[in-house]
Image (cartoon, rainbow, N blue to C red):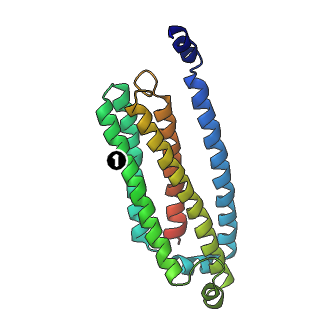
Amino acid sequence: MEQVKQIVHEHYDPEASKIGMWLFIFTELLLFGILFVIYAVYRYMNHSAFELAAEELDAFVGAVNTIILLISSMTIAMSTSALQKKNVKFALLLIGITLVLGIVFLINKYFEWGGKFDHGIFPGSAYLVENFSQGEILFFGLYFIMTGLHALHIIIGLILISVTMWRIYAGKVHADRPVLLENTGLYWHLVDLIWIFLFPLFYLII
């Protein structure tokens, strides 16, 4: 039994795991980077239309979601420090707060999207085609694609956070083996970073 534990321990490579996460983050940045370039091109070509379309978005809701993600990024970073100090209960509490904040973000996004759908503002709707210019339609298309993709990353992050919480509770992730929590934190910081760019691009456009 001790030999099996030793073999498992020998195969534990935190550095390789971190490198893998950084490579994954790099590919995600490339994906959103391409979308940001597409947005920049269409915004340059339809500047006035993008300004008009942006008036349909609620900057207050966007600001609230920004604050939520910034706080959640702080709590998951603090949870890593707490785990390293072997304060497991406090680490779990902080991760739980991060999880709740992520869910609140999605709830806000659900109501925000729901309001747009109720008014017929969604890709392919007859109302959108009949009442908005081509530039405004492009704006809303990019808005739903990019914020929708970001919301998908939030959902994936929440699943990852939940798994991490369970493994910490089970004692499989601890002060001497914190890489899963560290990688989860890196992923969540990526989600936060992407939103920091999305918020001004869509909600504060000038």
| Residue positioned 33% across, 30% down in the render | 88
5 or 29, nearer to the observer:
5
The residue at which mark 1 appears reads as 97
| Residue positioned 63% across, 48% down in the render | 29
The quarter holding residue 175 reads top left
Residue found at the very far bottom of the displayed protein = 130
The quarter holding residue 8 reads top right
Q: How many marks?
A: 1
Q: Is residue 87 left or right of residue 30?
A: left
In the rendered view, tell whether residue 21 sits above or below residue 117: above
Q: Is residue 92 left or right of residue 66?
A: left
Could you tell me residue 176's position as x and y percent? Answer: 43, 20
In the rendered view, tell whether residue 55 sits above or below residue 19: below
As helix, strand or loop, the secondary structure at mark 1 comes to helix
* Residue 189 in view (yes/no): no
In the rendered view, tell whether residue 136 sits above or below residue 202: below
Q: Residues within 10 Å of mark 1 (few under 14, many from 20)?
A: some
Could you tell me residue 12's position as x and y percent? Answer: 56, 21
Could you tell me residue 205's position as x and y percent? Answer: 53, 70
* Residue 18 in view (yes/no): yes
| Residue positioned 60% across, 88% down in the render | 127
Looking at the picture, which amino acid does disc 1 mark?
Ile
The quarter holding residue 46 reads bottom right
82 or 158, nearer to the observer:
158
Q: Is residue 23 left or right of residue 151?
A: right
In the rendered view, tell whether residue 138 sits above or below residue 96: below
Could you tell me residue 101's position as x and y percent? Answer: 38, 53
Residue found at the very far top of the displayed protein = 3
